[in-house]
Amino acid sequence: MTETKLFYDHGPRLFALPPGADFPAALIDGLRQRLHGQPPEAIARVELYVNTDRMARRLRALFDAGPASLLPKIRLVTDLADPLTRAQLPTPVPPLRRRLELTGLVSRLLEAQPDLAPRAALFDLSDSLATLMEEMHGENVPPDAISALDVSDQSGHWQRAQAFFDIVQGYFEDDAAPDAQAFTRRALALRMDRWEVAPPQHPVIVAGSTGSRGTTHAFMTAVARLPQGAVILPGLDGDMPGTVWDMLDDPLTGEDHPQYRFARLMRDLSLSPAQVARWTDAAAPAPARNRALSLALRPAPVTHQWLSEGPKLPDLPGAMTGVTLLEAPSLREEALAIALRLRQAAEDGTEAALITPDRMLTRQVTSALNHWGIVPDDSAGTPAQLTPPGRFLRLVAELFTRPLAADLMLSILKHPLCHAGADRGQHLLNSRDLELSIRKHGMPYPTPATLSDWGVTHDRPAWATWAGQLSACEPRALPLSDWVARHIALAEALAAGPDGTPRPLWDETAGRRLRIIMDGLGAEAEHGSEMSARDYADLLFALLSREEVRNPDAPHPLIRIWGTLEARVGGPKLMILAGLNEGSWPQAPAADPWLNRRMRAEAGLLLPERRIGLSAHDFQQAAAAPEVWLTRALKSDDAETVPSRWINRLVNLMTGLPDRHGPEALKQMKARAQPWLRLARASEAPIHADPAPRPSPAPPAEARPRHLSVTAIKRLVRDPYAIYARNVLDLKPLDPLMQAPDALMRGILTHSVIETFIKETVEDPSKLSPDRLSEIAADLLAQVPFPTVRTLWQSRVNRFAPWFTASEAERRRRATPQAANFEIEGKAEIPALGFTLTGTADRIDMDDRAGAHVYDYKTGTAPTAAMQKAFDRQLLLESAMLLQGAFPGLSPRHIAAATYVQLKPGEPKEIPAPLEDCPPEQVWAEFTALIAAYMDPGKGFTARRALQKDTDLSDYDHLSRFGEWDVTDAPVTMDLT
């Protein structure tokens, strides 16, 4: 068999392609050039290692496009184990299994030493510790190197970290089952041992990798020294002088530079930049731009070279042709402008890629493209926890963690995957009726019994019994396998519905992916420990958040969304580098709970700057494409943003080179973005519509309300539109699903406390004491399901109890309370108008002169005399009703007093109604005139007529379109007859 030969010199061999080159295409071109004249099967003997699956797919696609040939063996640099090596090594431990094992170890450690870390951090700590272990294996750093670190200045933190390191020492033993990184490191060691004895004679090429990981770097170094081995570097900066290359020797100062990893590789191979050959003669798309970018990205210690080398740059307007700098006012406008440009590229038949690590931005761009039916090829997909089955599984897991609450129950019942099927319409009707019943009558914490009672009452027993399984709280700690089995069983039962017919929980792309995840968790569950329901729910969320689901729709063949790593794949003529703000691109280094920056450097681990350096290389590679957009938002969440350091460097360099027309080039780059920003603003400009007038609807007389309560009269005076909406249109605000401990609930309970106390002390006056009032309050407040609120409300009662009991004795000297006259309902009619006024008096006492004493309890601030005269006439109207004989069994000769009893802690007092200024007869006459006015078909119900404050809210502001008008506008009567 004829050997395939690509190289005729001695190694080590490094090749490179310039930034902006179409790396896969150039790789294949160079390979074909070197194989020219050799038999067709020669290419099949080439072993080609690439950095990503996407790179491998692109290479296969280019080979498939022709001319016809055999394929080289395309493998990934992360998969270094051939069949022989796999037979010699133990099977690698799946990452999930290792994390589950660590979760159990960390859990037991935290139980023994709870001061080490909060239990809420259990899974984050386990995942972070597993990641550190993988990095130690990948960088070939033994535990002894960590133990030997100088920690004299941080002993407290180190002792806590060492406690965690101690529990994982066994994973570094020679006979320990390896994780993926340890397996790769062992596979590399075996392969290099074989190569020492019998190096392969066929071509072995590593292409597209920067060697940022220790194992990959060692593999690239070994391949470069093989007889037919070579490494092809992507985006090597050929414009950087040797003196700068020599400076990139210290990771603490150079690892954030885009070319640092190449400098390290050349240093380990004893090669200089001049000895790195071009893989092909193909020129970079924009060599002049590459020179400017190279200078802009120089290491910080040598940025003074801008002064010496800047004047030697080509004319910058020409160099920056094809570069657009878009600075949008907001993230939304940035996304819209990008979407518009991608749409134009699709119409023009131009390949385009959006490159950014900002997933929020990519989701907004995808949403905008969806308006035009464009589905981009997104390399990341959707996080599993955000897919419909992911959200459903998370909701179901929450059922185990706490007693069933109405909000969680309805969230599940209304989920599209709950009771999915032909009879889903009836299920939704049942869910709606149950919700309305809960809002009206209350059921904050449903149980199987209360749900069953509801089902019997509403003739839906089977459905209510099925819904009862939502009450699945489990307080015990259970093995992980039990949690997974229960979780899947309950989710499937809820998706099936009462008849148990299988429903599409695991259908579609997302469902199938979630099934794989849950099956994987079940398969590894035996390696987990017992855990609480809360721990299981947290584990599930952490697991789903790390998984992605690809879009099942057929993507557009020309429009792509990539992460920064895919920038090396190249190909598209238009590259949009978006989200170029500090903290986004480059992303801020994640917090390391174990080792600081100096300790990492001493141990030989990766520095936080590594990720920044990789991002810088991806930026330099993508920014050298034929056409480039550099975009950022000036504000994010209403806060000013900081431009990415690379944008800052480029702008500062160009601004400081007026001789090379830098400011003019920068102005042109920004000007190219303006038409797109204008289009973005125009695309969302609302269609002009005249603002709505301040409404004052005038319904026909027969539609106007014929009965109101005394508490509604204040609303009729201050906000007549609210009466129109509620009593004419019959629109009522929905009651809260989970009744909050608000002022209304506090008032109702306080009234109950006072009524119970008064009735009891009327029968036994000896109990008229602050202590007894507090005891009754404690008994009645026990029904409040909010411990903190219960304590606060009890304190309020305790504070006004001494004043109330003392003042109550005085009230009883004025008149004698009767048990029948508490919370007494009454109604008074205006026959001429066909109108009825209803009301419930808190308390009416009668004195020995047949005079009535009317009381109303207020837990907040009672209305002043001036407010009662003009707006709040509740007590005055009740007094007038009393003289009209509205309250059964009460026929007073006169109203002796009408008083608000203000039960406000710190300011309890009595506030009398102004009966002298507003006698009951006058009040009733004025009330009759008011109702007569609103019975006139020409009288409108004006919105927000006289609210106490302009900032007061009305339940119907949205209906009246308040905001399009304000209270200074004249009301417009709307004749509805």
Image (tube, rainbow, N blue to C red):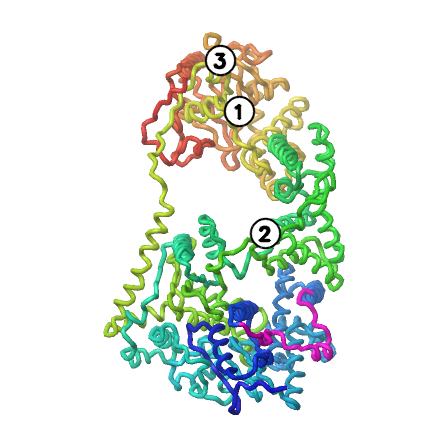
Residue sticking out furthest to the top: 832
Q: Magenta stretch: residue 88 in it?
A: yes
Number of residues whose C-alpha sits closer than 10 Å to that of mark 1, classed few (under 14), some (14–19) or many (20 or more): many
**In front of the other: label 2 or label 3?**
2
Callout 3 amino acid = Phe
Circles 3 and 1: CB atoms closer than 8 Å: no
3D distance between C-alphas at marks 1 and 2? 54 Å
Q: Which label sits on residue 835?
A: 3
User: Which quarter of the rendering shows the C terminus?
Assistant: top left
Task: Tell whether 636 sits left or right of 858.
Answer: left
Q: First in sequence: mark 1 or mark 2?
A: 2
Helix, strand or loop at label 3? It is strand
Q: Position of residue 909 (x, y in %)?
A: 50, 30
Question: In what element is the residue under mark 2?
Answer: loop
**234 or 794, which is in the foreground?**
234
Mark toward the start of the polypeptide (3 vs 1): 3
Mark 1: secondary structure: strand
Q: Earlier in the sequence, mark 2 or mark 3?
A: 2
Residue 254 occupies quadrant: bottom left
Residue of label 1: 856
Vertical side of 767 occupied by 390: above or below: below
> Does any portion of residue 698 appear in the rendered image?
yes
Q: Within 10 Å of the Cα at label 3, are there few (<14), some (14-19), or many (20+) other Cα atoms?
A: some
Report, in whole angstroms, how far the alpha carbon at label 3 lies from the one at label 1.
Answer: 24 Å
Label at residue 387: 2
Quarter of the image where the N terminus is located:
bottom right
Q: Are marks 2 and 3 in contact (CB under 8 Å)?
A: no
Q: Nearer the viewer, mark 1 or mark 2?
A: 2
- In the image: residue 424, left or right of residue 611: right
Q: Which residues are magenta?
A: 68-96
Q: Amino acid at mark 1?
A: Asp
